[in-house]
Image (cartoon, grey):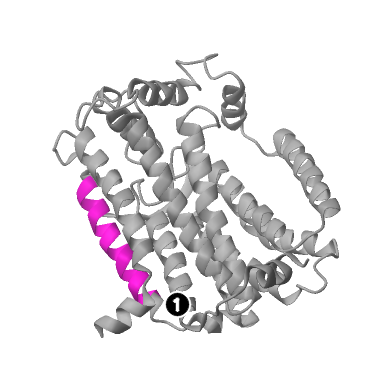
């Protein structure tokens, strides 16, 4: 049994994830001064254990049934219906109706939608590999992303909307589309953003984007979060202030240090050295995901692995970018570090499915993979 588990799990991937999780837990414990303020530390340990359980269980399930169109469409419609139900039964938090409140814990269904979107796009592009250069597939695939985009925008949850868009855009990139069509995608993105600016974005969302251009323009208002975050990161300097000595988080200047701004809280205590180490660990996680993606038994497995990598990279890029004051504050969690169970379950579920695909993975030559994957 032990040998069977060992063959199913990439322990190197687990080895890279564990220090990231530990960094998040230690940071949550430090800014509460050892007190159980908000129960963040204790609840997060429970979510981590549940997440790993999902990871190990999923690694033993044969997920080739996900190749069936009926199964993926059912999952897509189910999660879409759950997102729609939020407007009736959801809890309002920070101005967005994004959560189901079950008392002791809350659940954010959009995280599962991100995973399902990766699946349905992997299925769509894998079946149209030969004719992928037809530009119509860009717009048809965008229709699948448009449904969750609208449902999430109406909550409104601008951060998750960005992630959904990046997942679609990234999977369009890796599907083998021509450079001319890539330019059209970028042009479409600019046009869509312009339309959203005038017709969709709320005033506070526009303020965040203005704040991105000039974060110091209103440090007591819309720019407060970004300003305090950059102070926390900068005050950590090279080696940090030390565990438990992060004043920005302990004195409550830094908002949401357990979730949105946990990287800033960590950077204040561990400095540049600790921050670089975390980025290195994230890079190694992405490397392992891409490695197993390249060994996929078919285009579906390859594209799914690439989609999971895009999922993680989008979260990491946006969260750390807003912690450094380089991107607007959007409320996106940092994988494995931020407090919360919804994103952890989605992350571990995606990796568990990827581990399951190892049992029928195939060795592949780099040139062969390039020709098959990029349509060269």
Q: How many dots with numbers?
A: 1
Q: Secondary structure at mark 1?
A: helix
Quarter of the image for residue 162 reads top right
- In the image, 113: left or right of 356? right
Residue 81 shows in the view: no
Magenta segment's dominant SS is helix
Front-most of residues 132 and 167: 132
Front-most of residues 136 and 134: 134
Front-most of residues 6 and 28: 6
Q: Which residues are magenta?
A: 41-58
- In the image, 162: left or right of 124? left
Quarter of the image for residue 270 reads top left
Question: Is 54 contained in the magenta span?
Answer: yes
Image coordinates of residue 113 in percent, x first then y, are: 54, 61
Residue 20 shows in the view: yes
Residue at point 47%, 16% (across, down): 219
**In which quadrant of the rendered image does the N terminus lie?**
bottom left
Binning the other alpha carbons within 10 Å of mark 1 as few (below 14), some (14 to 19) or many (20 upward) gives many
- In the image, 309: left or right of 34? right
Image coordinates of residue 89 in percent, x first then y, are: 45, 56
Residue at point 34%, 62% (across, down): 14
Image coordinates of residue 66 in percent, x first then y, are: 56, 79
Identify the residue position indicated by label 1 in the image: 356
């Amino acid at each position: 049994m032990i040998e069977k588990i060992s063959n199913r799990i990439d322990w190197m991937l687990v080895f890279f994830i564990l220090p990231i999780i530990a960094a998040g837990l230690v940071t949550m414990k430090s800014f509460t001064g050892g007190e159980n303020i908000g129960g963040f530390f204790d609840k997060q340990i429970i979510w981590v254990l549940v997440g790993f359980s999902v990871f190990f269980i999923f690694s033993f399930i044969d997920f080739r049934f996900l190749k069936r169109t009926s199964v993926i469409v059912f999952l897509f419609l189910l999660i879409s219906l759950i997102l729609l139900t939020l407007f009736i039964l959801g809890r309002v938090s920070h101005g967005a109706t994004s959560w189901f409140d079950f008392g002791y814990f809350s659940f954010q269904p959009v995280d599962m939608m991100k995973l399902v979107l990766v699946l349905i796009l992997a299925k769509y592009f894998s079946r149209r590999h030969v004719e992928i250069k037809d530009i119509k597939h860009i717009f048809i695939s965008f229709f699948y992303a448009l449904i969750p985009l609208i449902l999430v925008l109406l909550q409104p949850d601008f951060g998750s909307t960005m992630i959904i868009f990046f997942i679609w855009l990234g999977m369009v990139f890796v599907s083998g589309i021509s450079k001319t069509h890539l330019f059209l995608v970028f042009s479409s993105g600019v046009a869509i953003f312009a339309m959203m600016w005038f017709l969709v974005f709320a005033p506070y969302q526009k303020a965040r984007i203005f704040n991105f251009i000039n974060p110091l323009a209103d440090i007591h208002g819309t720019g407060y979060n970004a300003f305090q975050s950059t102070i926390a990161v900068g005050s950590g300097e090279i080696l940090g202030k030390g565990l438990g000595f992060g004043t920005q988080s302990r004195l409550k200047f830094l908002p949401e240090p357990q979730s949105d701004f946990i990287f800033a809280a960590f950077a204040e205590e561990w400095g540049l050295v600790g921050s670089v180490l975390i980025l290195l660990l994230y890079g190694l996680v992405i490397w392992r995901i891409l490695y197993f993606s390249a060994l996929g038994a078919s285009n579906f497995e390859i594209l799914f692995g690439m989609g999971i990598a895009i999922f993680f990279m989008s979260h990491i890029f946006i969260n750390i970018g807003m912690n450094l004051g380089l991107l607007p504050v959007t409320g996106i969690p940092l994988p494995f570090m931020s407090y919360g169970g919804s994103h952890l379950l989605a992350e571990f579920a995606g990796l568990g499915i990827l581990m399951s695909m190892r049992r029928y993975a195939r060795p592949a030559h780099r040139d062969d993979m390039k020709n098959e994957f990029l349509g060269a």
